[in-house]
Amino acid sequence: MQDHDWQILGLTAVGTLSLVSIATAGIATSPSRAAVTYENLVPGVLPNLPVGPAPSSAMATFDSVQSPPPATFWGPDPVPLQQRFAAIKRSLIAGHETELETCWARLIDALRVEVEHVELLGAHLVPSIEFADLADPAQTSRFGRDLRRYGVGVVRKVFPRRDAEASALDTIRYLDSRRPRGGGVATGPSEAGVAAPRQANARPHARSHSHSHFRAPRQDPTCLDCFWTPAQVRARAHPNVLYAQRFMMSLWGPVADKRFATHLPIAYVDRIRIHGGGFGPESTGGFNANDTNAAASNASPPPANMAFSPPQQNPQSFFANQSADDWINALQSSAGIIAQVDNGSLERWEPDGYGRSGTYDRIFHGRWEDYDPWECSSRVNSTMDLYNGYGACTIFRMFQGLLALSTIEPGMLRLFPSPKLVTAYYLLRPFFTPRTPAPASRTGPEWDAYLAASNWRLQREPDTIIHGAVPGHAQRVTEHWHPHLCLRSSLVTLPTLQPGDYIFWHPDLPYHISNGAGHGMQTPSGNAAGADEISMLVYIPAAPLTQTNALYLARQRKAFQRGYPGPDFDSAGTGFVAEDPSTRPGESEMEFVGGIDGLRAMGLARWNTDDVKDEVAGLANSILFPE
């Protein structure tokens, strides 16, 4: 998963500038200015500025994109970048200006039709297939066709429901055992559920452990910085999960490239989303969501206590009576509705990012119709994180994924299901500017005239703005900066997910994940603090074995052995939210659940290299097992 931390620079109540979070930069600008310019961001230097007081608990957010303050990366005006980005933009379109001007009009027309199509079908266009039908050519052909069209799909009943619910309950117990209760000793996770063997050296976990608390960003309090819970460890190793990943990766374009093996999925360690059971926006439950000392270095996640937004809405009441427009109100910000795109931001335009392999060249050359979002050979050697952003994925992954371990009602995840048109639009948007500014009203003849292709002109001498992209952060698309996407109509919700359902989506798709509670599962009385109902989702993307991914596995394996976060969430290797290896699930549990393939996915066992097509497996073995 890319960062869901929505890092921002905010003005405090007394008007002084507070450094909320930026991966490698400081800022020196007047607090009275609403605009933040990248020219003032100096890598590695923190400004000597007065820091305002931490906000009160009443300022906790309900949704990660609610009402950013005036000085923000995601405010009404995009952030100007360094002058070199004007040169990058100029080089991308040099010699193709005429083609871009004509292709823009075609793209705007196609998007208008696409938005109407998406709005008409809504959740019905999201394809789904039963796990048991993955061997049925008729079913997989239908599913594959629709997946390639819309970029999103659900594989149902991947994780057995009984195992999903048991793993969720064991995870709640595991996390609950780490809550501070005034000292004392906490017990490890319950042995109910999946009957995996306990570690030989397992023992009760002392509260004195220096890293005993997890973090949950205040602006995204259901996304926990924990990585080795029972649910996560079991799900990553489960043979059905690995089988579903192989199937999904096989749906990309025909591949005759020995640099990667889609039939050899690897496990990428990511975070977990939990609502209820005493976790989530209504209760930090002892987790470090309010830790004011949390972000002293670039290795730490953003200081969640400094997210500025209006008073929190009760998520239970929000979802209980959610109307068709309620989610829009929750998403409002000074930039309008905001959605996120993973796998980099500026990297999509930079020559050392995706430009290294020419992934999007057809789009930048005015031939977006020829662009194939499912051609993967050009993505293998692309660099998706040039700025060491917290949570920025550095491996080659082919799908972002979420595994439901409870019932998740519609409204949790919304996407714009159009991988070709949407990608072409947000990549070309920085090259065009409106002749007439947007009217106050978003309906009527004036708004239609504003959106008309004739109202937009190509910047033949580009500026430094790349809408929604700043270093070290995920790409954003917003209602104000990307008006032709019509996000109010085009962000469709998923159908209901049952425990064990696995949702996949193309990493170029804009999406939004809600912090609110859907209908979850009942927790045993007394086994978890707080609410009796939980909802739980585990981030499990689909990624093939490659040389780069094998190198990452070597680092991730070391993190596992130490109980540290995944390397993309702990770039300095400090283990800021380390989990005690003696109490968290270990290698024997992975092997019990997933066998040798489960261990291989984590880089804990050698791959079989007898088959000539597994040339990359031999390379991976030499990286992971050099002796």
Image: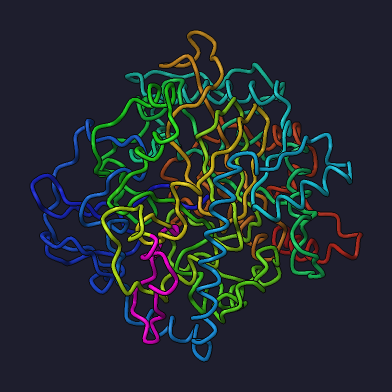
- 341 vs 140, left or right, is left
Give me the residue at 37% from left, 61% from top: 481
Give me the residue at 11% from left, 53% from top: 16
State the image coordinates of residue 179 (x, y, percent, origin top left). 40, 24
Q: Residue furthest front?
A: 445
Q: Is residue 613 above or below residue 179?
A: below
Q: Report whether residue 447 is seen.
A: yes
Q: Residue furthest top?
A: 525
Q: Residue furthest left?
A: 14
How is the model colour-coded? Answer: rainbow
Name the residue nearer the viewer: 378 or 127.
127
For the record, the magenta segment spans 448-476
State the image coordinates of residue 173 (x, y, percent, origin top left). 52, 20
Name the residue nearer the viewer: 393 or 295.
393
The answer to whether residue 474 is magenta is yes
Q: Is residue 349 above or below residue 340?
A: below
Name the residue nearer the viewer: 527 or 573.
527
- Quadrant where the C terminus sits is bottom right
Name the residue nearer the viewer: 85 or 211.
85
Give me the residue at 34% from left, 64% from top: 24
Q: Is residue 532 above or below residue 490?
A: above
State which quadrant residue 475 falls in: bottom left
State the image coordinates of residue 274 (x, y, percent, origin top left). 49, 30
Q: Is residue 297 above or below residue 564?
A: below
Give me the residue at 40% from left, 22% from top: 316
The answer to whether residue 396 is magenta is no
State the image coordinates of residue 430 (x, y, percent, origin top left). 41, 72
Q: Report whether residue 557 is seen.
A: no
State which quadrant residue 254 falls in: bottom right
- 478 vs 117, left or right, is left
